[in-house]
Image (tube, helix red, strand yellow):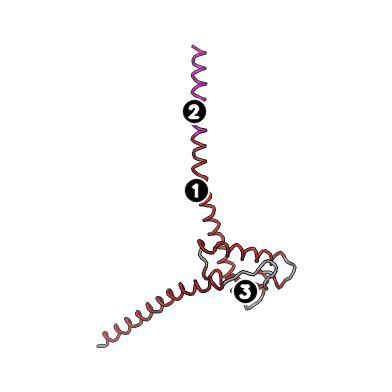
Amino acid sequence: QAQLSNQASREAAAAIMIARRFRRITLTGDARVQLRMAWTCPSAGALPTAGQQLALTRTLLRFYLPSVDSERLASLCRVLLEGMATHDYARAFAAAALQKGLSLYWIDTTRRLLLTCAAHLSAVGSSTQATKTPTHATNTATATATNTASNTATANNTATATA
C-alpha cells in the first residue's frame, strides 16, 4: 500500500507539472499577440531613457517572430543607436548596464538582442545569396564553356599550323 500511495503521489506531481507547462505554453501564445498589439516604438524625436530602452527591448524579444516583427526590430535598433549617439548619459542604452539593479537584465537582454539580430541578418543573407547563386552558377558555367571552346579552337589552329 505504501508503494501505491508513493506511485499515486508521483503521478499526481507529474500531472501537475504537465498542466503547468500546458498553461504556460497556452498563455505564452495569447500573451505574444497582446504584447505585439500593445508594443510601440517611440518616434525618432522622443528618445526614451536607458531603462525605458531596456524595457522596450525585453518586451520586443518576448514576442519577436522574424516573419512578422522585422520592422519592429529595425525601428528598435534605430532608437538604440540614436541613444548611443547622443551625449546625454541617461539616454544611452549602455547606461542601464552601469545601474546595479539593471546590470544583469541588461547583459541578458543585450545577448538576446545580438543573437536575434544575427539570426535575422543570417536569414536575410541566406535568402539574398539563394537568389544570387543561380545567376552566378550560370555565369560561371558560361565562362567555363567559352574558355573551353576558345582553348579547343586555339589547339586546333596550332595543330593545323604545325602540320
Amino acid at the residue labelled 1: Ala
Amino acid at the residue labelled 3: Ser
Mark 3 neighbour density, 10 Å: few (under 14) some (14–19) many (20 or more) = some
Q: Sequence order check: which comes first, mark 3 or mark 1?
A: 3
Q: CA distance from mark 3 to mark 2?
A: 63 Å
Residue farthest bottom in this picture: 1
Q: Residue at x 56, y 69 (%)?
A: 60
Left or right of 47 on screen, residue 144: left
The overriding secondary structure of the stretch rendered in magenta is: helix
Residue farthest left in this picture: 1
149 magenta-colored: yes
Q: Which mark is residue 148?
A: 2
Mark 1 neighbour density, 10 Å: few (under 14) some (14–19) many (20 or more) = few
Amino acid at the residue labelled 2: Thr
Q: Which mark is residue 64?
A: none
Of 88 and 131, nearer the camera is 131
Which corner quadrant of the image does residue 38 belong to? bottom right
Which corner quadrant of the image does residue 103 belong to? bottom right
Residue farthest right in this picture: 87
- Span colored in magenta: 142-163
